[in-house]
Image: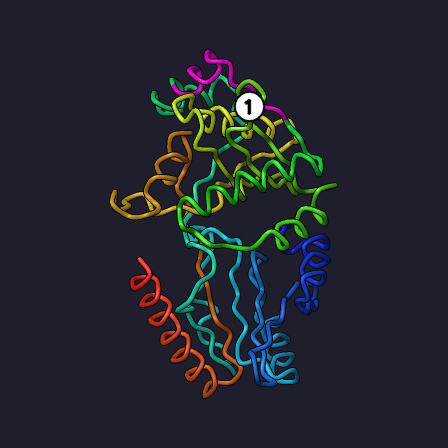
Amino acid sequence: MHPLQSEQWAKARKEMGVETVYVDGFLLTLHKIPKTSYKIGYLPRSAMPSKKVLNKLYDFGKKNKLIFIKIEPYIEKSKFQISNFKSIPNFKFQISKHPLFPSWTQILDLTKSEEELLKNFHPKTRYNIRLAQKKGVVVREESTDKGFETFAKLYFETTRRQKYFGHDYRYHKIVWENLKDNIAHILIAYYNDIPLAAYELWYLDGTGYYVYGGTSEQFRNLMASNLLMWEAIKLGKKLGAKKFDMWGSLPPDYDQTHPWSGFTRFKQGYGTKFVEFIGSYDLIINPFLYKIYNVFYKLREIYLSFNATFKT
């Protein structure tokens, strides 16, 4: 099971005020469209619903005024034939124009020994890990409320620095409070007791996930992030993970000028395998309103892009 299908995630979303339901064992979140009685359903990171379950989802959507249900299965493209699900009687199932998750990630095989893993790292990555160790950077697991606060400080410092505006503090705090005892872990890299980098990692059912990270502007030459990722990988092995999912990436032939190229290259340094998922799909319940929704969504994107450009 993926963490986004877990009971803990359902509780977190409810605490945020998001409606959650289970349809034949699949966790959905329901999102109301402002000033209307209509909603959008979201089914994240599940197994692929069978045709029988898709019919149940469609019926649920009809009864509850859903325009569509976005479905983003946690399934590798090489292991599944999505074409079997594109044409089903009674409804339309198509590739989403607005995916929430990237279709690519990088995954590391944790069944290998630490020696094998290190051997497969990029030479520069190995060098940076050893440099951080030599300079006195230490990494500690601090899966406590205090550790979360240290992580949050570094995370929001990073989002401001990179002009990336994701979820707010309340969101992250609720997620931590609901996942901290079973799924979420905090790792922090220190130099002379100064926190330089911190990760929030998730672990569930044999898979580790690098979900969120933050870094300080101080002592960037000490390569604390490189050592921190290595310790995150070792923690995954300690917890029993068989693989480590880097939670998103550009594809292997990525454009070096792309805004994501930096963290894609950073993750690639750990000897990962590029993996493509089957993608994001919309189960369309109301075709007419679905078209209108996509028009407004596009206009909203143009508006936000214009504002961002104007402010810059």
> Is 63 located above or below residue 237 in the figure?
below
Please tell me whether residue 19 belongs to the stretch shown in magenta.
no
From the top left corner, tell me how far across and down residue 232 is, in percent.
55, 30
Q: Quadrant of residue 36?
A: bottom right
Closer to the camera, 38 or 281?
38
Describe residue 99's horizontal placement relative to residue 35 as left or right: left
Q: According to the image, label 1 marks what residue?
A: 190
Closer to the camera, 188 or 11?
188
Q: Quadrant of residue 22?
A: bottom right
The residue at 61%/74% (across/down) is 57
Which residue is at the far top? 134
> Is 279 located above or below residue 228 in the figure?
below
Helix, strand or loop at mark 1? strand
Describe residue 118's horizontal placement relative to residue 140 as left or right: left
Provide the residue span drawn in magenta: 128-140
From the top left corner, tell me how far across and down residue 84 is, in percent.
46, 67
The residue at 72%/60% (across/down) is 15
Which residue is at the far front? 311
The residue at 39%/42% (across/down) is 274
Amino acid type for the residue under numbered disc 1: Tyr
> Is 191 located above or below residue 229 in the figure?
above
From the top left corner, tell me how far across and down residue 72 is, in percent.
51, 61
Describe residue 70's horizontal placement relative to residue 172 as left or right: left
